[in-house]
């Protein structure tokens, strides 16, 4: 991080409980040469990967449903979210991470994944880059029921949905997760 128009003058950890919240004070040189001092907080939760499993023959996709506290405290009555399978990279590369997460969360053991793009999901406050993947699945790839890892306190329901039903759920607001919406729209344009 060394940009001639940005000078970080102070960095302090505000919280290091679940992930890390830092406050940065920095000088920013505007186009006219003036220098402004800003203070911003940035939440570092690591980078992640997400995947849409699809089957073009059956015209289906595999999604998950689980409780998400931040949505609950922001008005989602049940806190349940329907999402594409995703996870944090930890020390894995994105492809290894998403293969592992797919096995743990959905029970499908996929071999070939295709990266389609990467995106900052909330660049005003979160450092995370999310790597987006797709993979075709079939019943013979199902090796377990999925559901996540008990030691990670995951309680994940696996959903196999007709693709048109998933699109309708987006329209009705049953699917509100940004990464899932992006993947379903990609699938509508490129796969189905």
Image: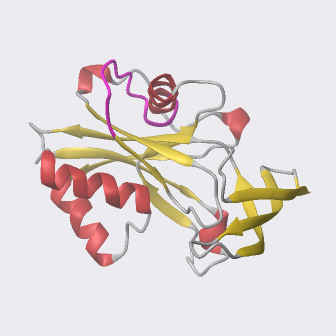
In front here: 128 or 106?
Answer: 128
Q: Which residues are magenta?
A: 104-116
Residue 110 in magenta stretch: yes
Query: For the image shown, how many numbered marks are present on the structure?
Result: 0
Q: Residue furthest front?
A: 33
Counting from the top left corner in percent of width and height, residue 55 is at 18, 37
Residue 91 is inside the magenta segment: no
Quadrant housing residue 41: bottom right
Could you tell me residue 16's position as x and y percent? 87, 50
Judge from the rendering whether residue 18 lies leftward or rightward of residue 160; answer left or right.
right
- Left or right: 7, with 58 as reference point: right
Work out whether residue 32 or residue 98 is closer to the camera in this orientation and state it: 32
Q: Nearer the viewer, residue 73 or 9?
A: 9
Please name the residue shown 14% across and 54% down the image: 189
- What is the basis of the colouring in this image? secondary structure
Camera-side residue of 21 and 106: 21
Residue at image coords 40%, 48%: 84
Give the residue at x 43% y 35%.
106
Tell me the quadrant of the picture where the N terminus can be found: top right
Report x, y in % for residue 45: 69, 48
Q: Where is residue 57? Give x, y as percent.
A: 9, 36
């Amino acid at each position: 991080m060394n940009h001639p128009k940005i000078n970080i003058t102070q960095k302090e950890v505000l919280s290091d409980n679940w992930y890390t919240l830092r406050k940065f004070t920095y000088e920013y040189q505007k186009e006219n040469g003036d220098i402004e001092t800003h203070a911003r907080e940035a939440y570092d939760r690591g980078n992640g990967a997400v995947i849409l499993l699809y089957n073009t023959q059956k015209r289906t996709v595999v999604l998950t449903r689980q409780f998400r506290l931040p949505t609950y405290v922001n008005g989602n009555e049940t806190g349940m979210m329907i999402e594409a399978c995703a996870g944090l990279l930890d020390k894995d590369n994105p492809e290894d991470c998403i293969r592992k997460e797919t096995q743990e969360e959905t029970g499908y053991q996929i071999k070939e994944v295709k990266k389609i793009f990467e995106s900052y999901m909330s660049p005003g406050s979160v450092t995370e880059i999310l790597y987006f993947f797709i993979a075709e699945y079939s019943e013979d790839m199902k090796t377990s029921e999925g559901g996540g890892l008990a030691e990670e306190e995951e309680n994940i329901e696996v959903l196999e949905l007709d693709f048109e039903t998933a699109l309708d759920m987006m329209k009705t607001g049953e699917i509100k997760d940004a990464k899932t919406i992006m993947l379903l729209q990609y699938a509508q344009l490129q796969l189905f």
